[in-house]
Amino acid sequence: MIQKIRLEKSQLREQIRIKRRAQSLNNAKIIFQDDAISNLINHPKLKSAQKIAIFLPTDTEPDVNQVSTKLRAKGLKTFIPRADGELLNWGEYSGRNQELQIKGKFAEPIEIVTPQPEFDVIIAPALAVDIYGNRLGQGGAFYDRVLKVSKAFKVAVVFEDEFLQNKIPTEEHDQKVDAVLTPNKFLELK
């Protein structure tokens, strides 16, 4: 049964990656609508938030840079991840490129904050999210490990057609999210 689930997840990942690569090659940059960002920023969980984990997108991910900029404009501290072995460590990010180093296809913080912050909100990348809050990541379980130990409000970011009505196959280690952000909407999942 576990092998079947892993195969289904792998096939779904590959389908989404193919679509994303084609979209990226067409230079089809999708901009987040102001309403989607406003609904996220005005959510009750963000009203009292101070520390937000967010990511810097690759060429094939939804471009959350404008989301990050608007969060900082509201006085929130944003943190971005750096992969260290099997863990994600976090560095504060104020939007300046001087704070970054390039590692493969990822921009990461040069400076890591210790001890690691307890986040109020985690905005995580995903390949897909379903209506039940199941998140399909890239397959390394980096974010699953972060989400598992955090009490933060958890938001996954996907393109519109990656927010699925059908249940995503899951394994025991897969962690759910509380909400989804797409370029056109922000939706809390129950």
Image (cartoon, rainbow, N blue to C red):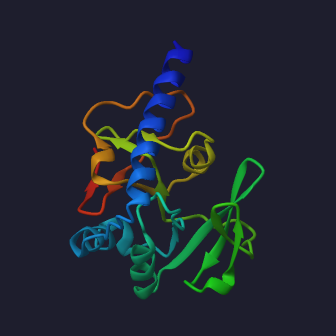
In this picture, residue 152 sits left or right of residue 89? left
Q: Quadrant of residue 56?
A: bottom right
Residue at 51% over, 44% down: 137
**Residue 133 visible from this viewpoint:** yes
Up/down of 3 relative to 141, above or below: above
Residue at 55% over, 44% down: 138
**Residue 80 placement (x, y as % from top left):** 60, 68
**Residue 45 placement (x, y as % from top left):** 36, 65
Q: Residue furthest front?
A: 26
Disc tally is: 0
Up/down of 137 relative to 99, above or below: above
The answer to which of 104 and 163 lies nearer the viewer is 104
Q: Residue furthest top?
A: 1
Q: Quadrant of residue 106?
A: bottom right
The answer to which of 51 and 21 lies nearer the viewer is 21
**Residue 176 visible from this viewpoint:** no
Residue at 40% over, 38% down: 134
**Residue 102 placement (x, y as % from top left):** 70, 70
In this picture, residue 138 sits left or right of residue 176? right
**Residue 99 placement (x, y as % from top left):** 67, 82
Up/down of 139 relative to 100, above or below: above
Q: Quadrant of the C terminus?
A: top left
The answer to which of 6 and 171 lies nearer the viewer is 6
In this picture, residue 73 sits left or right of residue 146? left
In this picture, residue 20 sits left or right of residue 85? left
